[in-house]
Amino acid sequence: MAAPFRIILRSSCKWTPKYSSIQPHAPILRIPKRLLCTTHTRKEARAFPSIFIAIGLIGTAAYYVLAPTSHKTLNSDSFIPYTITSRQPISPTSAIFTISPHHHDPSLPYLLPSSQEWKYPLWSVEFKQPEVQIARHYTPLPPADGENTKDGTLSFYIRAIGGGEMSTYLNRLGVGRDVYLRGPHKGFDVLKRLGEQKNVVFLAGGTGVVPGMQVAKAVLERDATTSVELLWAVRKREELQQCRQGASTKPWWNFWSTAAPAELTAEVEEPSAMGKQLARMKARYGERLTIRVAVDEERTRFTERDIKDALASGGRALPSPGCQLHDQCLHVHASEFEDPDTKCQCSPADRPGKNLLMVSGPDGFIAYYAGDKKWIGGTLTQGTVGGVAGVLQRKNPVLANDWLVLKL
């Protein structure tokens, strides 16, 4: 998921959301002066602590890579090895990775029983970076029609970003290398939140488009009367199709140009690997799926007017005070990794549900369009609705009732 938090491993194999030093340092060996009778002895004494520290560091690293576990297949408690079987470059900094587990699991935890269909409309896994012992959530790409999901193969759209330890590490890996996964981790139950409503608008920045693809597939497969509008903002056109020469390199979160985004059709000229995936989805769902793309290097962006027009398609919804799934106020302190037992408190007679405006991408992107997420007690929460969405709600209070805003 886009803009997911990262986690750091302690030497005890527990997890903490705070940054901390994790390498144990051996105590310095102090030799009494009466034993230092020669220069040669003093040099050996000075060498001992360095040797002990090196052994400690190597041992710690080996522990995380080689430590035994009772699990051999994907689970939410321990990291399991997968092998990179394919790497499709998109740009110098991005690619689609396909990975397969070392051990076959006859009952994958993210599939419905006796089915090839995914169990969750929105979910992710954690990747471990063994060099600095951190983990980060990544969202798998939805499988193509007819793809065999029971073999445990998963694909991910990953882009290396400056200062991103995990994405940079993964971008260096080639076919045949191992990665370590833990999960699945269920995200917001978008189908229960959508309920009787029919419309989802998903605003995505960069690799944040992958959760949008997950949501679109789940929503459009459930009900033939639903519709999804996927608004994807990218820095360069090469993420979608062949790169154009002479493009500018200004920051891709610039929000002050006036050109209009383009609508994607099923016939994308010279598509990238991601362009092909989006074109296949468009071909399958037709007019029920609208995909529009804004390219920063071409000075296009999604404006307040674009968001307002997208929200105009939403149906009217009844107020849902006190419902954990449908009350925006109760989402302020909620995490996207919610309790799976969260239930709707609305009356079934009210045909509960909300249209969904979902935003996924880098922190600055989310903050601009929907307001900042907030850390509370070590948990990243939704925070209040702000940004462009907040402005639209203040101008038209009906939107605040009919549309539930979710930040990923």
Image (spheres, rainbow, N blue to C red):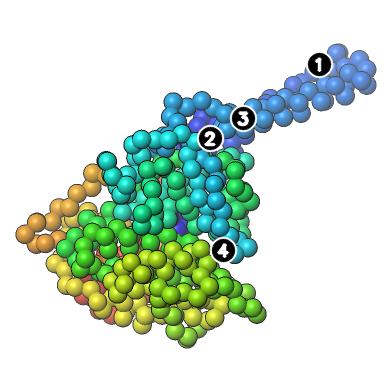
Q: Residue 62 shows which numbered tag? A: 3
State which tag comes first along the sequence, 4 or 1: 1
- Contact (CB < 8 A) between labels 4 and 3? no
Alpha carbon of mark 4 to alpha carbon of mark 1: how far? 61 Å
Q: Residue 90 shows which numbered tag? A: 4
Mark 3 surroundings: few (<14), some (14-19) or many (≥20) residues within 10 A: few
Q: At 60% from the left edge and 53% from the top edge, which residue is drawn? A: 171
- List x then y, in percent, for residue 393: 28, 74
Which of discs 4 and 1 lies nearer the camera? The answer is: 4
Alpha carbon of mark 4 to alpha carbon of mark 3: how far? 33 Å
Q: Which residue is mark 2?
A: 10
What amino acid is at disc 3?
Ala
Q: Which residue is mark 1?
A: 32
Which of discs 4 and 2 lies nearer the camera? The answer is: 4
Q: At 59% from the left edge and 73% from the top edge, which residue is drawn? A: 243
Mark 1 surroundings: few (<14), some (14-19) or many (≥20) residues within 10 A: few
State which tag comes first along the sequence, 3 or 2: 2
Alpha carbon of mark 1 to alpha carbon of mark 3: how far? 33 Å
Which of discs 2 and 1 lies nearer the camera? The answer is: 2
Alpha carbon of mark 2 to alpha carbon of mark 1: how far? 34 Å
Q: Residue 386 shows which numbered tag? A: none
Quadrant placement of the C terminus? bottom left
- How many numbered markers are drawn? 4
Q: At 56% from the left edge and 53% from the top edge, which residue is drawn? A: 87
Please say if 41 is above or below 115. above
What amino acid is at disc 4?
Ile
- Contact (CB < 8 A) between labels 2 and 1? no
The quadrant in which residue 76 appears is top left
Mark 4 surroundings: few (<14), some (14-19) or many (≥20) residues within 10 A: many
Quadrant placement of the N terminus? bottom left
Alpha carbon of mark 4 to alpha carbon of mark 2: how far? 35 Å
Q: Secondary structure at mark 1?
A: loop
